[in-house]
Image: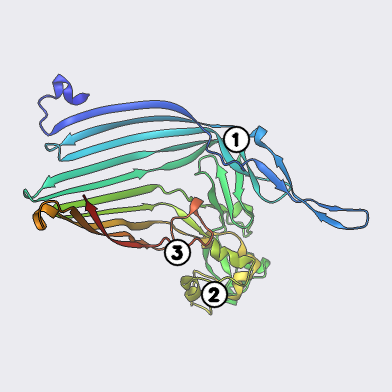
Amino acid sequence: MVSEEDFFQGVDLIEYLKLRGGWGQLGNDKIARQDGANTTNPVYLAIDDTQVNGSVTTSTFGYLGWETVTGTNVGLTAEMFDGRLSIESDYYVRDTENAAIPVSLKLQAGSVLRNVGTIRNQGLEMVLNWKGKISSDFSYTIGANFSTLKNEVLDLYGQSYINGGSAEFRQRSQVGEPLMSFYGYEVEGIYQNQSEIDNDPIASANGLVPGDFKFRDQDSNDELNDDDKVFLGSYIPTFNYGGSLGLTYKNIDFSMNIMGQAGNKILNRKRGEIIWTNDTNIDADLADGLWNGEGTSNKYPSASGLRRGWNQNFSDYLLEDGAFFRIQNVQLGYNLKGAELIGEGMPDARIYFTAERPLTLFKYNGFNPEVPNGIDRQFYPVPAVYTLGLNLKF
């Protein structure tokens, strides 16, 4: 412990300082029971041409083993200003070897897990807390925390990349990029008129019309193909944060907790479902932003273009900013002493009002920015819950 060393005794600002470091290795067996099982649906024809449907499940668990997580961290714990300020900070590096990554099947749709990668997660975590008193009746606490995360594929065991997701919503794992990043075309804008199309070799070759997407020609060869697809972002947040506030004045107490994240993308799958169905409603931002004539929009295609094959190519049109800020919890309470208020033998009471998730701010055009693996499959919005309560203590 640094603060107990002789050379540190003259430092009055910091009362407590401890440096720490660690290394460890764990096996990760958190793989769902059905993972590694490949299900097919063959159709058999009997002699009399009677169709018999069935399902056969073939297990590939023999190819799927535990992941190995190796972690290294260095950090410190400190207390300053007579214990009013406390700090905890850690820098960590966690490498996952034999990572179970979804691999697309070659002869049929879907994917199956395989131990085919090494993934690194590294970042900084910090927690700060301040406590103080304004008077003998009034005290407060303030807390803040944040963490950064850089996710990177280090090795795919000889493979240049591994495709995941689906044909319509492609994700790709590649060395040097985050795991299962979104992969597709970048939208430069919307073709506004016929003259613009006539002067664009890509538009002319593909029979495009005004109101169609203009995809970026990354290699400037006047052709659009797989070489023009790029990494469009990751579903993994690079920054998470939170905070807390606590106030106590005589018999009244108040607390609030906030949280949020940034640096990630969300796949708006609901918009993507327009690709194969006509019975899906569209969000207001898309409806209001559809191209309907020259100069009306350079962001979204025309209404008829939504179902045109060209515009159905996976692109950053379907990806949105996943950042959000949320007030997670607010509580206001009042404590009553039964003996003082009414008389000896009466129970103490606490009256409180609690609001759970009363406010969430985000730019995403869905109901909820917190979605598994960054893919919004029309999840229900997270409800706000308000509670008025009374506790009696006998």
Q: Are marks 3 and 2 in contact (CB under 8 Å)?
A: no
* Circle 3 SS class: loop
**Comes first in the chain, label 3 or label 2:** 2
Residue 91: give x, y in percent of width and height: 34, 35
Q: Secondary structure at mark 2?
A: loop
Mark 2: few/some/many CA within 10 Å (<14, 14-19, 20+): many
Q: Is residue 308 visible?
A: yes
| Residue 192 left/right relative to 204 | left
Q: How many angstroms separate mark 1 from mark 2 (CA)? A: 48 Å
Which mark sits nearer the N-terminus, 1 or 2? 1
The residue shown at (60%, 35%) is: 115
Residue designated by label 3: 367
Q: Residue furthest right?
A: 47
Residue 360 at what x, y percent from top left?
35, 61
Along the line of sight, the residue nearer the viewer: 357 or 19: 357
**Split into 4 quadrants, where in the image is the N terminus?**
top left
Amino acid type, residue under disc 2 in the picture: Gln
Single out the residue that lies furthest toward the top. Answer: 6
Q: Amino acid at mark 1?
A: Asn
Circle nearer the viewer, 1 or 2: 1
- Tell me, for residue 115, which label it has, or none: 1
Determine whether label 1 and label 2 are within 8 Å by CB: no
> Where residue 249 sits in the image (x, y, percent)?
12, 54
Name which residue type carries label 3. Answer: Phe
Query: Disc 3 or disc 2, which is closer to the eye?
Result: 3
Q: Secondary structure at mark 1?
A: strand
Q: Quadrant of residue 341?
A: bottom left
Q: Which mark is residue 192?
A: 2
